[in-house]
Image (cartoon, rainbow, N blue to C red):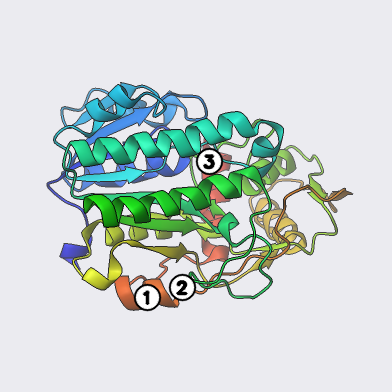
Amino acid sequence: MSNRIIENKKVLVTGGAGFIGSNLIEVLLKQNNTVVCLDNLATGHLKNIEAHLEKSNFTFIEGDIRDLETCKKATLGVDIVLHQAALGSVPRSINDPITSNAVNISGFLNMLWAVKENNVKRFVYAASSSTYGDHPDLPKQEDIIGNPLSPYAVTKYVNELYAKVFATTYGIETIGLRYFNVFGPKQDPNGAYAAVIPKFINLMREGEQPVINGTGEHSRDFTYIDNVVQMNQLAALTDNPDAINTVYNVACGENTNLNELFFAIKEALVFNGYNAPEEPIYGPERKGDVKHSLASIEKAEQLLGYAPTVKFEQGLQQTVQWFLATL
């Protein structure tokens, strides 16, 4: 499996001070790569990468993907781009679609153009399960999508369209990774657009009741960060022509509803000596939310050799332990 890890390469991670990006950087540096991190620190945090700032094989560029010259500078001499930079969150995109569009579409296009101009071999980018929109079928299969339900979903779908056009027009090798509700260490628990798992852990460890939007029957294919790191490496290194210039689901192929999530977090906190609340609070459903999300991972298994190493329960226990130790 040694050829399935990125080593002795120059890799650019955009959004590298964010949750997924900083986890990628940590692994890449351990594997003897030279790493460039590009982040404007709008949603990422310097604390996620500060342990690397003095390392000779790490460069931090504080800059914005909305600036083409910055993108060109960051991609110079790079072998692989792992593009994680984006403005996430469905509610954020509903409240401010203009900024989400500028970052997620214009910024993405800048990155593609910089990759083309600097002859970067492989461009792996964060796509999203939100692209499946209102299509009712479960599990979600890559070639069957519905209508987007939010501006965020529109932006992530447009990324896929642009990647495909750049592959056919300019010969760039692109692979999109449709992430399904990624969670794990370094995920931000604070702010209006915090993801559900860190937010719930943060509230419940203080004995506060979290609010579940809707009845709690909404379900998600929660995916631990280690599986995402694995998929980025597989996508960056595959030499199978059938595996390139396409998109993949990144998930575990299992779903958990929000009620089950609440009680799983409660159990983990109680096990660690915390007095977690007995029940959640139920609030109104959120606009743009997909009811159920469950991935087929067959395509990734067949074409990339993907095999999730950490399932939901184990990942949740590790995540709770990390938050209890660091927050």
In the image: residue 211, left or right of residue 28: right
Q: Earlier in the sequence, mark 1 or mark 3?
A: 3
Residue found at x 13% / y 35%: 77
Q: Amino acid at mark 2?
A: Ile
Q: Which residue is mark 1?
A: 301
Q: Which residue is mark 2?
A: 297
Residue found at x 60% / y 44%: 152
Question: Which quadrant would the C terminus be assigned to in this image?
Answer: top right
In front of the other: 158 or 16: 158
Which SS class for mark 3? loop
Does residue 287 appear in this view? yes
Determine the image quadrant of residue 256. bottom right
Which SS class for mark 2? loop
Report crowding for label 3: few under 14, some 14 to 19, many 20 or more residues within 10 A (C-alpha): many
The residues tagged by marks 2 and 3 sit, at their Cα atoms, a distance apart of 24 Å
Q: Which residue is mark 3?
A: 187
In the image: residue 172, left or right of residue 302: left
Residue found at x 16% / y 42%: 119
In the image: residue 140, left or right of residue 215: left
